[in-house]
Image (cartoon, helix red, strand yellow):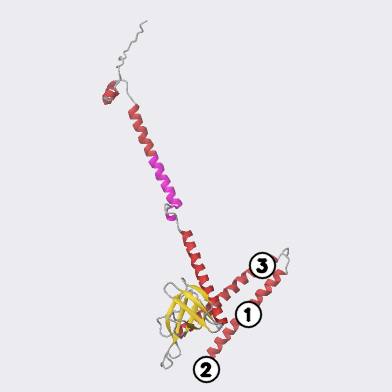
Amino acid sequence: MALYSFSKRKRLSNLLCCVLFICCFFRYKHFLRDLTENTSPDNPEFQQLSKTVKAVSEVTQRIQDNARSHENHLQLRRVQKQLKGRKTRILTPGRRYIREGWLKTVPPKGTEAKPKMFYLFSDILLQAKPCSPIHPFNGDKFACQQIYPLKECTVDKVFGHTKSQGGLISLTFARAKLLLMSDDQGDINDWYRSLCLAIGQLKSKNTVVHRRDELRRKPIRSEPDSQNTPELQQTRGIKRTMMLDEEVREHRENTDSSSSIPSTGESGYSATKRLKPNQAPAARPQESSGSSCVIL
């Protein structure tokens, strides 16, 4: 028992030290920022102070992001424990908790509005009802009834149906329509702003991701980057040069064999024999002899 209490006190002291360090770190950031703003740019220490302020600001921003992420994780775990069973999964990466509260759902047939518990997250709206209070295990929990995705949701205010008592908002989804009412005008206005903000952020995020995917697409006729490496281009150039040299060599051989006509001996006979009839000369020249004479 004494060992347990000692370890517990040690954890508490470590946590207190971390909190004090974070508080002092934030004060140190403000102190450095004020010192830099009151330092002349001509001062030789101005550059070093500016770099220090930038580094300290990055660290403090990281600490704040981690704190918000931890708090959001705790909220998701709390909501998960409030729901009955494990079928509904709340702990999902990238999901943020926004708010929760009681709202009345107005049925389309005009019957009495029933209060329901709603949980608003960054991507879904969860509707739940309280479990039976006489249940031995789930008396203080909620049963999930419906999950509405905010990706294809539009929200509108409905005027003239509450007689200046509270408010009414309309939610239109891909396959459902929901009318939510509250007797508190300020509460329904807060819900309306939270829903509009969550839907707008979700749609803008999907648009940015879609544009990035389109920018990453390559033309249809372009070759992949893996086929345009410098080594592969050099190999292709060598092969193309060898093929051109071979074609030029064959062309020269064909040209020399077709244009050369020997004048004496058996080679001349064979060359004459290879000529076609229509390519034969009109008159055979006289054979040359050892002595030549000129007739005047």
Question: In the depicted view, which residue is nearer to us: 66 or 92?
Answer: 92
10 Å neighbourhood of mark 3: few (<14), some, or many (≥20)? some
Quick one: label 3 or label 2, which is nearer the N terminus? 2
Sequence order check, earlier mark of 2 and 1:
2
Quick one: label 1 or label 3, which is nearer the N terminus? 1
Mark 1 Cα-neighbour bin, 10 Å: few <14, some 14–19, many ≥20: few
User: Is 27 drawn above or below residue 37 in the view shown?
Assistant: below
Residue numbers of the magenta segment: 224-244
Q: Is residue 267 visible?
A: no
Q: CA distance from mark 2 to mark 1?
A: 32 Å
Tell me if label 2 and label 1 are in contact, CB under 8 Å: no
Total numbered labels placed on residues in the image: 3
Residue under pointer 2: 2
Give percent across and percent down for residue 246: 37, 39
Q: Which residue is mark 1?
A: 23
Residue at horizontal 70 percent and vertical 66 percent from the top: 46
Quarter of the figure that contains the C terminus:
top left
Distance (Cα) linking label 3 and label 2: 50 Å
Residue 237, given in percent of the width and then of the height, sits at: 43, 45
